[in-house]
Amino acid sequence: MYEPFPHRAGVSACTDTSFSTSMMMNKLRFGTIALVAAALLSVAVITPAPAARSLPLSSVRVQQEAQTTDTAQVQPAPTPIPASDIARRYEETDARLRVFRDRVALSPDVIEVAEELPEMIVARQELAEDSANLAAEDLTFRRLENLRRRWRRLEGRLDAAEAHVAARSRVLEEEGRTLSQLRAIWQVTLETASERGLPPSAMERVNSMLSAIEEADSTLRARLDFLVALQNQIAEVTIEVSEQLERVVAAQQVARTMLFRQDAPYLWEALRSPSEQGQAIAGVRARWEEERSGLADFIRDYQGRVLIHLAIFTALFLLLIALRRRCSEGPEEDDHLAGYAPILARPASSSILVSLLLTPIMYGPNQPVIGELFRLVAVLPVLRLLPAMLPSRLHGPLYMLALVYLINQVSELLLPPYAERFVLLLVAALALAGAWWVQKAVGQLDTATATKGWRAALLLARLVSIVLVGSLVTNILGNVLLAELLTDGGLDSAMAAAVVVVSARVLDGVVILLIATQMAQRLNFVRRHKETIIRRAVAVIYMAAVFTWGSMLLLRVQLLGPLLDLLKAILGQELSVGSLNVSLGDILAIAVAIWITVLLSRFVRFMLAEDVFPRVQLPRGVGDSISKVVHYTILALGGVIALAAAGIEWQSFALIAGALGIGIGFGLQNLVNNFVSGMILIFERPIQLGDTVEFGTRLGVVKRIGIRSSTVRTFDGAEVIVPNGNLISAEVVNWTLSDRLRRLEIPVGVAYGTDIHRVLEILVEVAQKHPDVLDHPAPQGLFRGFGDSSLDFVAWLWTANFDQWRRVGSEVAVSIHDALAEAGITIPFPQRDLHLKSIDSSVSREIALGGRDKPKR
């Protein structure tokens, strides 16, 4: 059992968060007013909680004890255990106490915290000694940032330790409440024993159980005392760490204000001043020891993440080797594969460079040792990969700049403070020469080679040259802080540009080579949209590269922190409308969540349509229904995430649901009706996409089924927006619900006296010869009856080409006409017989003569 640490006064932070919303609503008279009120109430719940308060640890324990007392007051009074039930309850309580002993034991996390806390205290003392020299002249931006990160890392370790101890304390407090309930039950059983006349054996069991409970309670209190002492000690160290961290941050701010002030003698005066070499050498040894211990601590604390990092490197290395084999086996004329041969030729360097980019994500930004190691290690893969991508005339300045960069990185560890200024001057001069060399080499490139990327490189080289000239001037004039900042910023910007460009090129090549593999080509969406995927992937990679380069540069020149603080302040600004408070950050979070949700929904539906549905046998319309359900499900989840990002609590949805219920009751009946009808259309599928439907006087093809309305395109070319409720409640004729068969009727009339049997044979023969007429059901010729001027027939035939049924009917009708004409069968026109009962004699004579005696004009 671990003895508790000596009790120390400390504090522990807790938060007391409350959430309240209020809103005035006008009297609801019409449906539109109700809808507006529902929307306002939905937004009102976004009101953020007030700021949390910090309370001393003693106050926290008083509140916890008060809560425990209140809980005990509402619990029913304990009742004595019946005599017949004492034996069974004794066994149950004994089993519960055995579980209790296991639960109150110190967890491995707490034991680890107790073991590491003395080490963290020693680390705090060492950091405090380093921070005591904040006003020293040799304390540069590098050491200030290094010191800040080390304090941040120690603060993170303390926060994690406090979280483990607090979680264990909550478990023990819960066990203490359970133990108190058991003690009360057995105590009241003992107090009423004489009144009930319990036998001696029962009394012995009661006393024995009370003794066991008291022993368990003593163990629990010892554990709680140990945890409280541990919490106090952690709180004390945390307070000191926070104070020291504030001092370092304040020193950084002071250093920024002194950037444009002289902080050292002029260079010619510094050359004449003596230097304390003994103390300088001791300082260098101290820095080496500090880096060594920091690296050892990092490996010990992040051993699991280091192994995961190595696994990522190994997986990427094996992937590049497999892609190199695929490239060597692929056709030589494949430009995509041939263009990335330099990357595949050096898979180890490519894997190291991409893996190094994951360092901030894997370990966080507050790791000074790993940050310095990253800057040193990144030079090797860049020198291995970048020359293969550059013209030969740029190799010389590239190696020169890399050497200068390495000198600048190791100068702080190898050189005493008094010599760093002179090395900084030499580094700036050499870097300026290298930047001039790069400008000269890029300027000699021909027009075809000088692409947009080279123009950007030329611009960067010119900017770096200007910065280095400023570093030389400020160093000579005694402004060493500004000179150091300018030199580091210029060199790091160039190195960061090389790292991100080469890494982007590697990732670009990996994407293109993966798309070119046979496994990827089996996917329909890759095979059909290869160029689009490559173009968008490359765009995303280079956008991320630009963002990474900007972040690395801002971090190096001490501007990333202030910019982030400014951004947080802007996003934290609240817009107040009455009692409604919404911050810009909440609005941005909602917008980003909705945007990502829409993109995700589109991508999932695209994948379903391109690669999932074509590979499975689904009834017609089921794929579209699944796609819509997935779409609305993703949108609903995205909406919930967006509301959660805005700070809306789950219980607030009851208010929103009530407000929406009022709005639905007054003015949204039609909207809800169409929504429910849309769900019926999606799941029941009485109408599907591509169906030919007839409703009212309109006939057309269904082009879209939405959540509220559907779109039908008529054969005249008009698009009709039909509310879903009309498609469900009204009578709709679906010509293609179960199949796409269509029966055609072609009426035919022939002259009286024609052979009826011959006509029927012709109708059937002509229909059977047409390629779009089905054999089953077989075509039929039917005699309808005797018309006024003709014998009436009809040809019945079926076609599976529903979209072309008008064309098929026309072609069959023309063929019937030709066949009847060939057979000598006449298609008559309507005739009438005129019978005259009385007529004038002159008219009769004219008719008989036929107008022969009529005088000529």
Image (tube, grey):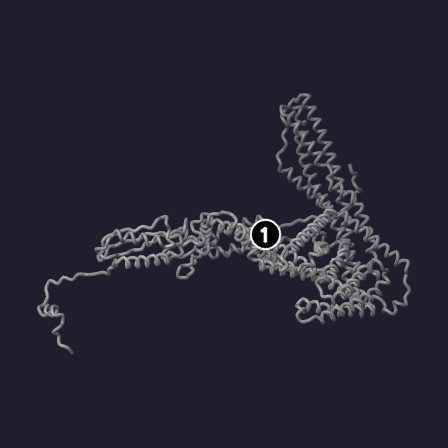
Q: Nearer the viewer, residue 326 or 256?
A: 326
Return the x and y of residue 347 as percentages of the image width and height: 71, 54
Question: Badge 1: how crowded within 10 Å, few (<14), some, or many (20+)?
Answer: some
Image-based side of 520 in relation to 232, left or right:
left
**On screen, residue 363 above or below 422:** above
* Residue occupying the far bottom of the picture: 857
**Quarter occupied by the N terminus:** top right
Residue 278: quarter of image: bottom right
**On screen, residue 736 above or below 459:** above
**On screen, residue 373 above or below 162:** below
Image-based side of 784 in relation to 326, left or right:
left
Residue 718: quarter of image: bottom left
User: Could you tell me the amino acid type at mark 1?
Assistant: Ile
Q: Which residue is mark 1?
A: 641
Return the x and y of residue 209 as percentages of the image width and height: 70, 28
Return the x and y of residue 83 as percentages of the image width and height: 63, 24
Instruction: Look at 73% across and 42% down and name the residue there.
Output: 109
Residue 588: quarter of image: bottom right
Image-based side of 386 in relation to 772, left or right:
right
SS at circle 1: helix
Q: Nearer the viewer, residue 151 or 389?
A: 389
